[in-house]
Amino acid sequence: MNYHNKQFRPLSNSENGEVSEDTRFHYKQEGNILTSEYSGAQIVKGHLIGLVDENGNINMRYHQVNNQGELMTGICHSTPEIMPSGKIRLHEKWQWTSGDQSSGESVLEEV
């Protein structure tokens, strides 16, 4: 699975997360290395880097600056689902490595 030049938007997120429906992720992929810039809603600017396995699962790390001027960091594991439309839906389990170090779940869908 290749995520290069795909855009994703959140469909849902845990209350302790900072992404919302206004956040947009722009994925780039070279080999099995995935990167993304993202922003929107509470996030002024964010970046992620991850590794994609042979099944399209993503193991990533992220950092972002929120609209309160805080630098937030975390880890995330995404599992892809191919929708009937052919679009990709990502089921994510994440945890902050900064702040309260709480965890949550989100769902992203290809735009």
Image (cartoon, rainbow, N blue to C red):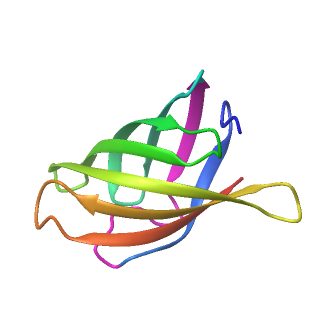
Q: How many marks overall? A: 0
Task: Give 101 or 56, whichever is nearer the viewer.
Answer: 56
Q: Is residue 52 left or right of residue 39?
A: right
The residue at 26%/51% (across/down) is: 74
**Where, quadrant-wise, is the N terminus in this rendering?**
top right
Q: Is residue 27 magenta?
A: yes
Give percent across and percent down for residue 69. 16, 49
Q: Is residue 59 left or right of residue 57?
A: left
View extreme (top): residue: 30
Placement of 96 over or under 24, stated as above or below: below
Q: Is residue 6 shown in magenta?
A: no
For image coordinates 45% across by 43% down, the residue present is 38
Residue 39: x %, y % from top left = 43, 46
Q: Residue furthest bottom?
A: 15
Quarter location, residue 26:
top right
**Relative depth, front residue between 105 and 77:** 77
Q: Which residues are magenta?
A: 15-29
Q: Residue farthest to the front?
A: 54
Q: Name the residue at 52% across, 60% down.
A: 22
What residue appears at the point 51 percent right and 46 percent down from the top-left corner?
Answer: 58
Question: Looking at the picture, how far across and down is residue 14, in whole percent?
Answer: 38, 77
Work out whether residue 62 or residue 37 is closer to the camera in this orientation and state it.
62
Magenta-drawn stretch, dominant element (helix, strand or loop): loop
Q: Residue furthest right?
A: 85
Instruction: Tell me the quarter of the picture where residue 5 sits.
Output: top right
Residue 50 drawn above or below residue 40: above
Position in image of residue 59 (x %, y %): 43, 45
